[in-house]
Amino acid sequence: MDMSQRISPALSLESLPRFQRATVSAIEWDRLGLSEARRLRELGFDEGVGVEVLHRAGLRGGPIACRIGRMTVAIRRAVAAVIHVSTADVAPVAA
């Protein structure tokens, strides 16, 4: 594996600043339950997709609202933590 292709744990969707566009670089599918993984795929989450965090619930560990394609979806922070993003070579968020 090329070192530039490795997963960088430094920036997860959970830690992405609000309104900063990014591209999903990797998803740790094995850390998700089957139903969580299925839901993410149904919502369009996959490597190479553009994403943007719009809002974080004020509750500790509360959900994160993000834009993927033309949809706004809410996901749990634990799920957002296994979605790795890159701000270099940003894919468009709206399709």
Image (cartoon, rainbow, N blue to C red):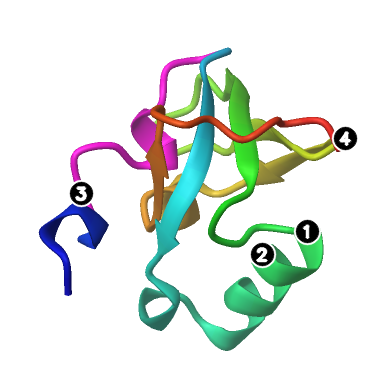
Sequence-first disc among 4 and 3: 3
- Residue ID for mark 3: 9
At label 4, the amino acid type is Arg
Left or right: residue 1 versus residue 77 is: left
Helix, strand or loop at label 1? It is helix
| Callout 4–callout 3 Cβ contact below 8 Å | no
Question: Where does the image place residue 66, in percent across and percent down from the top left?
Answer: 66, 32
Question: Where does the image place residue 25, in percent across and percent down from the top left?
Answer: 42, 52
The image's mark for residue 70 is: 4
The image's mark for residue 43 is: 1
Within 10 Å of the Cα at label 2, are there few (<14), some (14-19), or many (20+) other Cα atoms? some
Sequence-first disc among 1 and 3: 3
| Callout 4–callout 1 Cβ contact below 8 Å | no
- Residue ID for mark 2: 40
Magenta residues span 7-18
Quarter holding residue 36: bottom right
Within 10 Å of the Cα at label 3, are there few (<14), some (14-19), or many (20+) other Cα atoms? few
- Distance from the alpha carbon under mark 4 to that under mark 3: 27 Å
